[in-house]
Amino acid sequence: MLDVMMNDILGTPAILVGLFALVGLLIQKKSASTVLSGTLKTIMGFVILGAGAAVLIGSLTHFSKMFDHAFQVQGVIPNNEAIVAAAQTTFGTSTALIMVFGMVMNLLLARFTPLKYIFLTGHHTLFMACLIAASLSVGGMSGAPLIIIGSIVLGLCMVIFPAILQPTVRQITGNNDFAVGHFGSIGYYVSAKIGQLFGNKAKSTEAIAVPKSLGFLRDTSVAISLTMSLFFIVVALFAGRSYIEAQLSGGSNFIVFAIIQAITFAAGVYIILAGVRMLIAEIIPAFKGIADKLVPNAKPALDCPTIFPFAPNAVIIGFLFSFLAGLLSMFALPLIGLKVIVPGLVPHFFTGAAAGIFGNATGGRIGSMAGAFANGIIISFIPAILLIFMGDIGYEGTTFGDSDFGIVGIIIINILKLFGAV
């Protein structure tokens, strides 16, 4: 029963958000047809978002294989799904309990404190629960104290991180209807601050002047397709025709394959944006019932792609500059005695894109580029530092990726060390 609750309900973002929409519409005493329509469309929005992410990730997986073969990179690849799957044999039960009671703590904190955020990104809740369970274990805790402390820490993370981002989210969206609930918050916050210091928000990425002869670049899908085609073709040339046609393309011409994968990437972004628009259109009115009745003035904290439609140009700029920082960090890390962190395309796309949007909101184009670059450095160095503190709990070849996981893990372990823990 616990496994079903964690993996099939609480661990499935579409069902979790759909349940909140259902409760919100029922509390408002909407008609049966409205309840059914609103709930299904909310779930559908998340399913579309997930489908777009799957298309995009499939394209990035091919890119990663070409990149690894071309440059013979060896090191640790941050991947939240991989590390959580590997950790379940050791921390499965404690992860599940921390997740369930952490969500209860989130509701209590939203109800009785000024931090009125309900974190609805279910898979990130699971990842953070696992990170907390592992970190407390490294610090010498076990049993009931581990579950209790872990649940409190998770609940705090679920309200504090959205809260620190909300001032910038209001600038991005132009309203206060929802928050960002994604554990890359430290990277986004730093990006916004860097944009504020060095950029000019009047010069937005979305106001880039395009000559009439290049007017087709105003279409985001076309611009992403062309940018990524260049990216894919260059890496394909380094990887070599024989490898791509034998291992990846099934015999298709390697340049054609690279171009198709680039356009597939753009299609994934397009699908994500469509899903986000449907999700926001349904979840905000439905969530009003929960906010009014159960947790007054609460805001839903949603996954980071929910802000992508507000600055599509910043999405691709953020990804590219975050990835560039990851590449440079890969060579810098061993120089200071840390393990090589191979830049993963998935974390750099999602967190880099979001960081680019946050930097753009406060510092325009310069803020978007500089902020995303800073995010790329953060998600390269923080996982490498976390590996040191995790010790024997670390799993070969992978670790947690997004910034908040590393920060929370490092803080937990060092606080416990201060109190004499192992």
Image: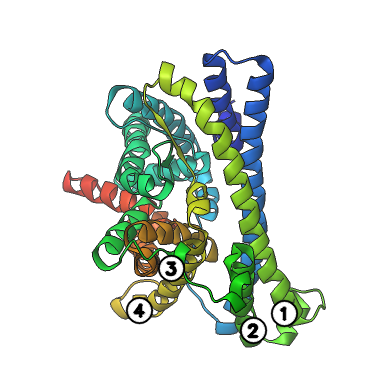
Mark nearer the viewer, 3 or 1: 3
Choose top left, top right, bottom left or bottom right for residue 104. top left
Task: Say what secondary structure mark 4 lies in.
Answer: helix
Q: Which residue is mark 1?
A: 244
Q: Which residue is mark 4?
A: 332
* Residue 374 image point, x, y percent: 34, 67
- State how many labels appear: 4
Q: Visible in this render: residue 115?
A: yes
Choose top left, top right, bottom left or bottom right for residue 332. bottom left
| Residue 80 vertical position relative to residue 324 in the rendered view, above or below | above
Q: Which residue is mark 3?
A: 322
* Residue 39 image point, x, y percent: 63, 27
| Residue 200 vertical position relative to residue 419 in the rendered view, above or below | below
Per the model, the C-alpha gap separating discs 3 and 4 is 15 Å
Per the model, the C-alpha gap separating discs 2 and 1 is 7 Å
**Circles 2 and 1: CB distance less than 8 Å?**
yes
**Going from the N terminus, do you reach mark 4 or mark 1 first?**
1
Per the model, the C-alpha gap separating discs 4 and 1 is 29 Å
Per the model, the C-alpha gap separating discs 3 and 1 is 26 Å
Q: Looking at numbered disc 3 in the image, what kind of residue is underneath it? A: Ser
* Residue 339 image point, x, y percent: 39, 71
Q: Looking at numbered disc 1 in the image, what kind of residue is underneath it? A: Ile
Instruction: Specify the label residue 239 is tagged with.
Output: 2
**Residue at the image point whose x is 79% and y is 81% from the top:** 253
Q: Looking at numbered disc 2 in the image, what kind of residue is underneath it? A: Ala
Q: Nearer the viewer, residue 84 or 162?
A: 162
Task: Say what secondary structure mark 3 lies in.
Answer: helix
Task: Say what secondary structure mark 1 lies in.
Answer: helix
How crowded pointer 1 is (Cα within 10 Å; few <14, some 14-19, many 20+) is rated as many
How crowded pointer 4 is (Cα within 10 Å; few <14, some 14-19, many 20+) is rated as some
